Amino acid sequence: MAADALQLLRQAKAAYGPEYDKHLFEQYKLYVDMADRISARRMLANSFFVGVHTALITAFTVLLKEKVLLPTLGGLAPFAAVLLLCFIWWRVIRSYRQLNSAKFKVVYALEQLLPAAPYDAEWNALGRGEDARLYLPLTHVENAVPLCFGLLYALLALTLYVK
């Protein structure tokens, strides 16, 4: 995506002055670092949700084994709550994916103004995420994890009614 399509540039090089190239490169480095931080926060959020859901699956299994949860509406309420938590997790993943996509569009646009475009070249080498044999985007895997936990909760809820 071209820098002008994103309305990235606010001043022409001639109007900015002699520090233009240096400042452009510094901004690029800062922006790439910010994109990396978003990815790190995304992994931290996933780790948090995996830990919470692992503890909840364990707790629900014990509660079912000890017959604390009964086949009533009240017994199903905790399952509804954790399914909602799975949906929130899935939505967080989607939000991070959208944010990362936008950030890398800006990185690619900035690279059009620089002598080299390593991120764009890497993305091209990976088939732009369209060929799973070259690269399976992490987001595709990430999206399945909350669904898997949701399925586990649904199966656990079914055990309330299976004798």
Image (cartoon, helix red, strand yellow):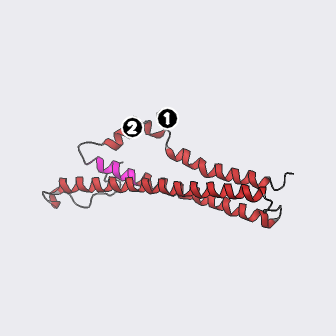
Instruction: Point out the tag, 2 or 1, that comes first from the N-terminus.
Output: 2
Mark 1 lies on residue: 131
Q: Is residue 94 visible?
A: no
Expressed as whole percent of the image width and height from the top left, the position of residue 33 reads 33, 54
Give the camera-side residue of 108 and 67.
67
User: Which residue matches tag 2?
Assistant: 124
Can residue 158 be seen here? The reply is: yes
Classify residue 113 as left or right of residue 17: right
State the predominant SS element of the stretch in magenta.
Answer: helix
- Residue at 43% x, 54% y is 40
Q: Residues within 10 Å of mark 1 (few under 14, many from 20)?
A: few
Give the amino acid at mark 2: Asn
Which SS class for mark 1?
Answer: loop
Occupied quadrant, residue 8: bottom left
Examine the image and state in which quarter residue 160 appears. bottom right
**Amino acid at pointer 1:** Asp
The foreground one among 20 and 82 is 82
Q: Residue at x 59, y 58 (%)?
A: 52
- View extreme (right): residue: 163
Q: CA distance from mark 2 to mark 1?
A: 11 Å
Q: Position of residue 26 (x, y in %)?
A: 24, 55
* Residue numbers of the magenta segment: 103-113
**Residue at x 50%, y 39% (from the top left corner):** 136
- What residue is drawn where x is 65% and y is 52%? 149
Relative image position of residue 6 (x, y in whole percent): 35, 55
